[in-house]
Amino acid sequence: MTSTPTEWPRDSVGIVKEESFTFGSPESPLALTCGRTLGPVTLAYETCGELSPEKDNAILILHALSGDAHVAGYHTPEDRKPGWWDFMVGHGRPFDVDKYFVICSNVIGGCKGSTGPSSINPQTGKPYNLDFPMVTIADMVNAQKHLIDHLGIRRLLCVTGGSMGGMQALQWSIACPERVASAIPIATTCRQNAMQIGWDEVGRQAIYADADWCNGAYLLHNKRPVKGLAAARMLAHITYLSAESMQRKFGRRLREKENYGYDFGLDFEVESYLRHQGEIFVNRFDANSYLYITKALDYFDLERDHGSLRNAFENVLTRYLVLSFTSDWLYPTAQSLELVHALQNNRKRVRFRELETWYGHDSFLLPNAEMMALVSDFLATVQQEVRKV
């Protein structure tokens, strides 16, 4: 049966509009960390709620590696699947659109409406492909600053996100201390360790090894490296789960059979699940964007950029709520505590909570009553403080 707005949850934001903002020209481009420039630059974004007359209720939500600007609600009445953080954004939800103006944009380097390697290079009239410059988390944030300026917002009430979104939130608070009242970094890190970089590299190698990758020029040959990208996604997806979640979901259950096939076909339920995850991913994501964004993750290192983590947070003016999950082995609690200690050493205001879950890294993408209550209470306190000033 076709979905209609009356069938959606009453606290849903309902229909949201896809928007875009373009800035930067060849004469005045966006300067990048790598030394190159990019322009013009388009950012795809969506908003929910209303900006207050004082423009003091804006929250910027920042997505993870494979996310996009569609954070909540539906694009059409026929949509069955809402935005990726829909349970967090809505009427009476933690990011309450009756109180806050919520913004989410697709990062540069992405493939969901923002300028990335699959975009047309104005100098050649063809896709950038690997001519696209390397981008960093700092570059993503610098591009977002142009969007926030365009919306007329001087200071954000909060910046928040999980995983790569948390990295962007940290970068925002450091690069623009006077423009960020609070930050909620979730399941994230101040810098990737060797294992995390290693997982990203194996995923990239899977894409490189696909004959249809064509050294990044697959769009010019009307091809797509679907096998390599699917393998990269399967590998990454394992890191987003936990041993317990995989055991609970699949164990050693066989897929529609009672005995092993003794061949290289599907035997186990977990094999079928991972193949499905790979198949659906290639239909919505660009392989070159995957390469560029994982590199941006690997380059993120606040200690290297500032000499030490204490130096990195020395001048921040932001109040923080840092959240981690017990079962997250991709960005474990120890990395969140490293951030918390750096903030405490600078006598910054920070609250930390490790949440008990068995879902793994992806816990932030799943409803969690404690997480939702913590975020809701934290934002209410910050908004009260901001409006007293």
Image (cartoon, helix red, strand yellow):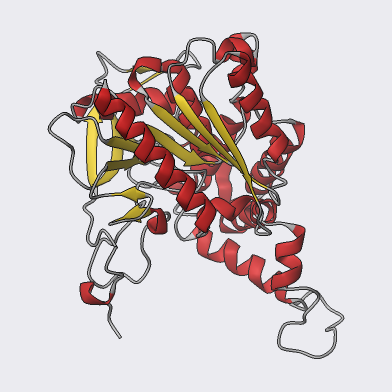
Q: Toward which corner of the image does residue 186 lie, by quadrant?
A: top right
Q: Is residue 317 above or below residue 222?
A: above
Q: Position of residue 238 (x, y in %)?
A: 69, 56
Image quadrant containing the N terminus: bottom left
Looking at this view, is 168 or 57 the one in front? 57
Residue drawn at x 59%, y 25% is 300
Q: Is residue 240 above or below residue 153?
A: below
Residue drawn at x 67%, y 73% is 272
Residue drawn at x 44%, y 54% is 222
Looking at this view, is 336 or 136 the one in front? 336
Q: Position of residue 194 (x, y in %)?
A: 76, 31
Looking at this view, is 321 or 219 the one in front? 321
Q: Is residue 351 above or below residue 24?
A: below
Q: Toward which corner of the image does residue 148 lie, by quadrant?
A: top left
Determine whether, in the image, residue 278 is placed left or right of residue 285.
right
Residue 334 in view, yes or no: yes
Residue 121 in view, yes or no: no
Determine whether, in the image, residue 223 is placed left or right of residue 339.
left
Q: Residue furthest bottom?
A: 258
Determine whether, in the image, residue 43 is placed left or right of residue 50.
right
Q: Position of residue 93 (x, y in %)?
A: 35, 55
Q: Position of residue 307 (x, y in %)?
A: 64, 8
The mark tally for this picture is 0
Residue drawn at x 65%, y 12% is 308
Image quadrant containing the C terminus: top left
